[in-house]
Image (cartoon, grey):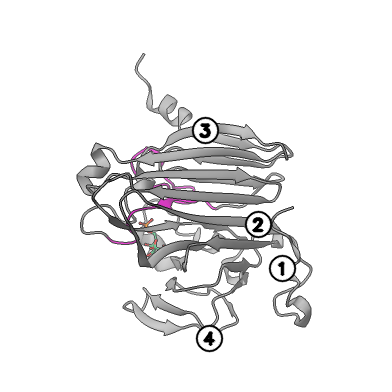
Amino acid sequence: MATTAAAMAATSVVVLDRGNNTTCTINLHGATVVSWRVNNQEQLFVSKLASFDGKKAIRGGIPFVFPQFGAWSFGPQHGFARITRWHLERPPERLHNGDVEAIFSLMDNDFTRSIWNYQFRISYRLILREKELHFHIGVYNPSKELSFTFNMLLHTYLKVPDVRRCQITGLQGCHFIDKTRENSLYQEGREVVTVNEWTDRIYQHTPQEHVITNVVSGRKMRLHKYNFPDTVIWNPWIDRSREMSDFGDDEFPNMLCVEAGNVTSPVILLPGTAFEASQILQQFKCPYTINSKNWRGKLTAFPLYD
Ligand code: TA6
């Protein structure tokens, strides 16, 4: 029986269910996380015009950018990983502590080699915890002779009630490439970064942690990253929204991209070696507003690991 597009689409979705209306849904198309619900509250933004045709990148959730960030003379913008079907290496499994884990993988194939003629293997392990989502990534170079270089980034679309009320910590003093001003280089002077216009910045050598305030229902999101030296902040505002057919003109106030990645310093992977990186998203409630004098040190009061 021919697999209908709908059946294909249906079988393209993997759900991690931790109970208590806490779930994470991954589309095998790009291994794109398309939903993360904590106690039935969606944490990620997916455009109402997003395409799920198994060809175009999904507009929202967490697309996986590899091996190129941005425009690419050899292939699609942001690489091929987000528009390629991944393999479900290990189906969702409940761990002893109640968390749920699944592993996805992507290897080179005729399509990827037609664009980027290297052997590679990526393993992408997702762990759904009570209020956290963990991402552990391994990139392996199985070649005996050839090294390759790559960018990698998790293009996280956070769902927010009003992006103008969000604040992002951990960028003060960092240099950034401003793609809204001819890619000129600047240094961030603000203790907390806010977004009130078209914003498209590549912050370099950022600290391991950012806290984003006023995400879903006024809570905070902590992004903890390892081996991802850069942080991209993006909101298309109205002008760029109109340029995207898979993004509603009125949707920009409800999303904020905070993207951990290797952008300005590509990774060089020697033959037979591997590279690892990880990200943890933690949703939490904290009585302290970032401006209140006594927040310092309070935001780290929430242990990442029990
Ligand atoms: O990550 C920010 C960015 O590079 C922006 O420049 C903008 O282009 C965005 O990604 C979306 O890119 P896409 O290829 O998904 O339209």
The image's mark for residue 300 is: 1
Choose the circle earlier in sequence order: 1 or 3.
3
The first of marks 2 and 4 along the sequence is: 4
Vertical comparison of 60 with 110: above or below:
below
Q: Residues within 10 Å of mark 3 (few under 14, many from 20)?
A: few
Label total for image: 4
Tag 2 or tag 1, which sits nearer the N-term?
2
Image quarter for ligand 1 equals bottom left
Which quadrant of the structure image shows residue 1? top left
Looking at the image, do the residues carrying marks 1 and 3 touch, with CB atoms under 8 Å apart? no
Q: Residues within 10 Å of mark 1 (few under 14, many from 20)?
A: few
Amino acid bearing label 1: Thr
Q: Amino acid at mark 3?
A: Arg
The residue pinned by badge 3 equals: 90
The residues colored magenta run 45-71
Q: Nearer the viewer, residue 2 or 277?
A: 277
Q: Main secondary structure of the magenta part?
A: loop
Which residue position is annotated with label 4? 189
Residue found at x 28% / y 45%: 143
